[in-house]
């Protein structure tokens, strides 16, 4: 081993042995021999560094405010947010750290999904498995949370949020929105310049285009979920890429440019330049109405074909300096009280199984404000489909760039 790398490994090992404050690193294999009380005890009076995407202000306010306050009061944990512009930045950093033998990192906890999770799992840069050790995992459907974009989670990440893709329109301008994705295509052709979507790699723009792959008719949407089928992808993707390319002249600015972000698209919508916007949070329009950012006449809809709904997950890096603290924070974020507080502050779907809630918790969920622009949970659930396997996502995004954006 080169001398420089040997020194780095020795220093990292010493750092792990010394610990930080009252936290103590331990391998995931020790979980089976530890009680939850022991884990919680190790977590008290420690700092947990939580790496998350910080592109949403409502989320930032909640996790830096009420969520951090609860952890401080209940567990004496200090939550420090590590801002991420893109989760892939941290994944790449962890891959580099593992290659360098850095056994003590700077992040204890990360919000991770989809392709990033698949890469992290394959690279062996996650600590765990740990999910079965969490008392609050009982509140989640173990079958529904077994896959993350087609990759089996295998206890390496824990579910804590659920979202579903919705469209928004202004009912003062449009009496009835398109009822299906086919009708949406017709509407776009009949109203040139009045529709657009964020350019990939924007997450929402990628999700929007992927609906046409899932609803291509080459197979039911569920066929795209659990494994990658190259033959199915070839049959389904080629006509969809052609369809999206043919759509370009009917888009805002004739498809010569796309909004770079969802925030930019929302501005176009509010300014009356386009007639629809979109989001992964079913409550986003109601939230924006309440803040005075959208007109009171804005409403949301989902096409009858169904829209993508996914869980968000939390994972622990392989070299997290404070795994006990990370476990305690994750368990708190999976609790009914946290989910209710998060729904009040941020909106979104309530991800926990109702059968596992107390009577008072069910009452609290029933009393959550829905907002005039938010669809009933029953309507959302009736039009919910799972997202595609991460390999479909990767390939489709690359094909969109070459077959739509650059063509």
Image (cartoon, rainbow, N blue to C red):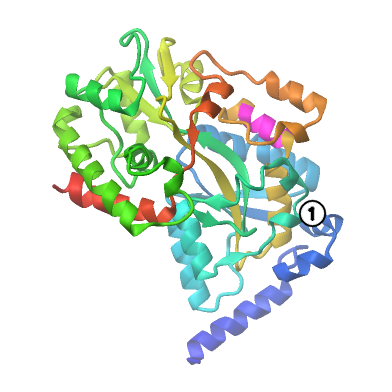
- Residue 63 appears left or right of 30: left
Q: Return the residue nearer the eye: 169 or 240.
A: 240
| Residue at the image position 70 percent from the left and 49 percent from the top | 329
Is 27 in front, or is 24? 27
Q: Is residue 202 visible?
A: yes
- In this rendering, would 268 be left or right of 329? left
The range drawn in magenta is 337-343
Quarter occupied by residue 38: bottom right
Q: Pick the residue in front: 72 or 275.
A: 275
The image quarter in which residue 351 lies: top right
Task: Describe the element under mark 1 as helix, strand or loop.
Answer: loop
Q: Is residue 353 above or below residue 229?
A: above
Point 78% across, 63% down: residue? 22
Q: Position of residue 161 (x, y in %)?
A: 59, 40
Would you say residue 132 sits in the magenta stretch? no
Prevailing secondary structure class for the magenta stretch in the rendered image = helix
Q: Is residue 26 visible?
A: no
Check disc 1: other Cα within 10 Å, few if <14, some if 14-19, many if 20+.
many
Report whether 306 appears left or right of 82: left
Residue holding disc 1: 44
x, y percent for residue 340? 68, 30
Q: Position of residue 388 (x, y in %)?
A: 43, 47
Question: Residue 376 location in percent, x, y?
Answer: 56, 19
Give above or below for 297 relative to 354: above
The answer to whether residue 211 is above or below residue 104 is: above
Q: Residue at x 56, y 75 (%)?
A: 102
Q: Is residue 337 left or right of residue 311?
A: right
Q: Report the number of numbered marks.
A: 1
Q: Residue at x 32, y 52 (%)?
A: 233
């Amino acid at each position: 081993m080169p001398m420089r790398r040997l020194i780095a490994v020795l220093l990292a090992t010493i750092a792990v042995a010394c610990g930080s404050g009252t936290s103590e690193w331990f391998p995931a294999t020790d979980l089976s021999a530890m009680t939850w009380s022991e884990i919680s005890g190790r977590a008290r009076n420690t700092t947990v560094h939580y790496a998350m995407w910080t592109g949403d202000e409502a989320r930032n306010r909640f996790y830096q405010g009420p969520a951090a306050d609860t952890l401080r009061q209940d567990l004496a944990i200090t939550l420090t947010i590590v801002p991420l512009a893109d989760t892939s930045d941290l994944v790449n950093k962890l891959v580099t750290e593992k290659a360098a033998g850095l056994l003590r990192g700077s992040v204890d906890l990360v919000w991770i999904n989809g392709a990033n999770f698949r890469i992290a799992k394959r690279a062996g840069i996650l600590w765990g498995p740990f999910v079965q050790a969490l008392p609050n995992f009982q509140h989640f459907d173990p079958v529904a949370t077994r896959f993350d974009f087609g990759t089996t989670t295998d206890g390496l990440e824990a579910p804590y949020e659920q979202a579903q893709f919705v469209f928004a329109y202004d009912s003062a301008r449009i009496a009835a929105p398109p009822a299906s994705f086919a009708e949406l295509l017709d509407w776009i052709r009949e109203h040139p310049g009045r529709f657009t979507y964020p350019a990939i790699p924007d997450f929402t723009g990628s999700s929007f285009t992927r609906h046409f792959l899932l609803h291509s008719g080459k197979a039911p949407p569920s066929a795209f979920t659990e494994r990658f089928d190259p033959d199915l992808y070839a049959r389904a993707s080629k006509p969809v890429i052609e369809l999206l390319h043919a759509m370009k002249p009917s888009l805002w600015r004739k498809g010569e440019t796309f909004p770079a972000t969802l925030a930019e698209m929302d501005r176009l919508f509010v300014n009356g330049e386009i007639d629809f916007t979109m989001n992964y949070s079913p409550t986003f329009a109601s939230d924006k109405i309440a803040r005075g950012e959208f007109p009171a006449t804005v409403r949301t809809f989902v096409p009858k074909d169904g829209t993508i709904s996914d869980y968000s997950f939390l994972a622990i890096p392989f070299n997290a300096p404070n795994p006990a603290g990370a476990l305690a924070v994750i368990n708190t974020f999976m609790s009914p009280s946290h989910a209710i507080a998060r729904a009040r502050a941020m909106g979104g779907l309530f991800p926990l199984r109702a059968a596992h809630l107390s009577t008072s918790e069910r009452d609290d969920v029933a009393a959550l404000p829905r907002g005039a622009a938010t669809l009933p949970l029953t309507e959302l659930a009736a039009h919910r489909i799972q997202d595609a396997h991460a390999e479909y996502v990767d390939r489709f995004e690359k094909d969109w760039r070459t077959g739509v954006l650059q063509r």
